Amino acid sequence: MGKALVARAPGGPEVMDWVDLPDGRPGRGEVLLRHTAIGVNFIDIYYRSGLYPWPEATMIPGAEAAGVVEAVGEGVTDLRVGDRVAYVLPFGAYRETRVVPADRLVPLPAGIEPATAAGALLKGLTAQYLVTASYRVQAGDTVLVHAAAGGVGLLLGPWLAALGATAIGTAGGPEKVALARRHGYAEVIDYRADDFVAEVARLTAGAGCNAVYDSVGADTWRGSLKCLRRRGVFVNFGQSSGMIRDFALSDLAAGSLTAIRPVLFDYIVTRAELLTRSADLFARITDGTLQLDVVNTRPLRDAGALHADMEARRTMGSTVLLA
């Protein structure tokens, strides 16, 4: 018997209750994990709040976790009891134990700690597909990243720099600006003090950016489009300030722009894709390209308080829940 945070109805952080939950037994092609570390992401809040629809009457948030294999089901041949693994799934990770499809598990290389994997897998795979598939970054590109001091933003900065691109970030307040500057950004704009559209125009001598990676959404999308050069690409991969609701296709006409709304799970559909993208991520962690900051660790049962901090934009970098 393990513990879990279960939401009975959509709402604020208070809807999650700390309850007993049976461990479950792995069926064919499944594995029973004991979680050691669980990542926290805005997608957890989107599900908990009801912004994303629930597939069942109750909801266990949590999209990524690392753990140890405790039992394997029939037909599982490439995993053994005691193996260290991690996974990304849309929800269900805020629990101490869980049965997971074996083909969704990524073995952890030596040197990758559980807290590192739990704090970096979803965000790191997101950064990986953003720069390699949603918009394939080339050396010499100029790219704008909103929320540069957030979990994905802190990975995009050094990744873009390693690809030979010039990364411009936005962040709110001096502390977050300083953090982003330490993570590969050539320039960081404090959006609380400056108009980021005007600053991007100044920094690029009016040329604009090849692409904008925007996870903020409602508050930034119009300005993001204005920051693009002709035939630039607007990549909206989140909505921390709310969903974009008044976008029109004609908004792209000023400069023959392209817009895309990608979702991670469409880029790791097959096990081959999952393993290829995670191998790229882990290689960049181990070779030092990506310097990971786990700013906070909290007990799993305190996830509600962390959600409140995230929604109020009081957090920086990654926070990991310890099971």
Image (spheres, rainbow, N blue to C red):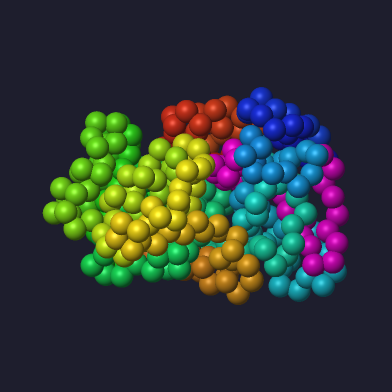
Residue 81 position within the rendered picture, expressed as x and y whole percent measured from the top left: 74, 62
Foreground pick, 164 / 108: 164
Residue at 35% of width from left, 58% of height from top?
253
- Left or right, 139 with respect to 109, comes to left
Direction front: furthest residue: 250
- Left or right, 143 with respect to 274, comes to left
- Give the magenta-colored segment's residue range: 21-46
Number of dots carrying numbers: 0
Residue 221 position within the rendered picture, expressed as x and y whole percent measured from the top left: 39, 46
- Left or right, 141 with respect to 21, comes to left
* Quarter of image, res 102: bottom right
Residue 83 position within the rendered picture, expressed as x and y whole percent measured from the top left: 67, 62
Residue at 70% of width from left, 67% of height from top?
103
Residue 286 position within the rendered picture, expressed as x and y whole percent measured from the top left: 42, 63
Residue at 34% of width from left, 48% of height from top?
224
* Quarter of image, res 315: top left
